[in-house]
Image (spheres, rainbow, N blue to C red):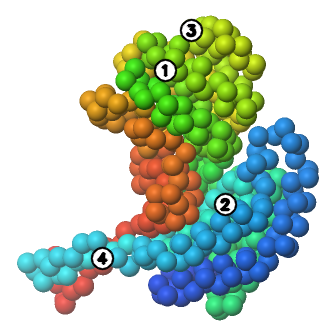
Amino acid sequence: METILPLLEKTHETSLQMRLLSDSEKSKILASLAKIIGQEEENILKENKKDVVKMEDSNPKKDRLILNSERIQDLVSGLKSVANLSDPTNQVLLNQKLQNGLSIEKISVPLGVVGIIYESRPNVTIDVAALCIRSGNACVLRGGTDAFHSNLKLVSLIHQALEQHGINKEAVQLLPTDRKFVKEMLEAKQFIDVIIPRGSQHLIDFVRENSKVPTIETGAGVCHTYVHASADLDKATDIVVNAKVSRPSVCNALDTILVDATVAKDFLPKIMSEMSEYDVEIFADAAAYKIFAANNYPKLIKADESDFGREFLDFKCSVKVVKNVDEALAHIRKHSSKHSEAIVSEDKNICTRFLKEVDAASVYTNASTRFTDGGIFGLGAEIGISTQKLHARGPFALEKLTTEKWVIRGDGQVR
């Protein structure tokens, strides 16, 4: 293949058909897709295995690549959930009549063609397609080579569901993984309305710096949990351990623990047994290192500056002892990626200050950052977590896949 422009043009042409779909038609397509995926579980797993066996066990991305029975059922549940969400399009956002008799409405409409560039997460293929179909958008998917067989199979099932309902299968287009086509995609502003990168900071930076198509970033997560002097240390232990080990390869996992000096000697030993059980590698500043070393923590490394502001995506985290809330907030301002930040504290005034001062898409008090997720927030599946401030911030879900149109009805008025 010399060019992907004919593929992009076909998807652009189908965007009109998608835009004209009714609420019930879109829901029925997703219900059909959920049924097909459930029936095809065995075949999906076979194709996924072809991808999984090629990746080293030591690669932290491997967990993201793996599909199993539970994760496929999650896809089925997610599709049903999105199908049952309210249609975000054709909503009247403003309605007024001018003195000259003109009737003016502002309504929500699909973006058109949504382009997604993502890495080794085949579930993204279903999540993105579901959200785009439900919001009346066509979509162009450029997945990573790591998930080639998985994505090919999943998109074939999406096409099957679309064609069952008389929809052109080109409404969901899977692009070749050859890197030479990425630049062409990023410059196809005549066919793609918005591009959303989902993956590493390197990928996001590359898309932002090279795209001529408007871009919405779903940022990398450098997530902190700050244990304040007033914290319930048992509660803090549960929160910190969950945020780190429950699924370390995702963007809302914990990367850095900040702990007040007055409670560090009591708190850090409390997390050691569970962290050690998961072989979590600790990159500790000087004060934290002394405490961990005194308690014989097995996987301990002296941290340098590069270990703060680092997204680990693995069973690793950095730890820093701070003097007080001022130092903790200053550290977060310097190193946060503005994804998800948390404080554990029993002081309501300190919690309120943290919520007001921390500039992030999601800010928590006394809870794990692992909750930053469109499904958990009741938004259905998500395209990613946006860390920017224009158009979308936080879980980038269904309602953000729309824009606005002004509709003016007159009866011969002139200006």
Q: Nearer the viewer, mark 4 or mark 3?
A: 3
Q: Could you tell me the amino acid type at mark 4?
A: Val
Q: Name the residue under label 2.
A: 124
Of the two numbered discs 4 and 2 in the rendering, the one whose residue sits closer to the viewer: 2
Please name the residue shown 67% across and 13% down the image.
Answer: 295
Q: Earlier in the sequence, mark 4 or mark 2?
A: 4
State the image quarter where residue 175 is shown: bottom right
Which residue was labeled with disc 4?
92
Earlier residue among tags 4 and 3: 4
Q: How crowded is mark 2: few (under 14 residues within 10 Å), some or many (20 or more)?
A: many
For label 1, the residue is 259
Query: Disc 4 versus disc 3: distance between alpha carbons?
Result: 57 Å
Q: Can residue 22 be seen in this view?
A: yes
Indicate the position of residue 48 as horizontal and vertical percent values. 84, 62
| Earlier sequence position, callout 2 versus callout 3 | 2
Horizontally, is 50 left or right of 116 in the view?
A: right
- The quarter of the picture where the C terminus appears is bottom left
For the residues marked 4 and 2, what is the alpha-carbon distance in whole angstroms?
30 Å
Which quadrant holds residue 345? Answer: top left
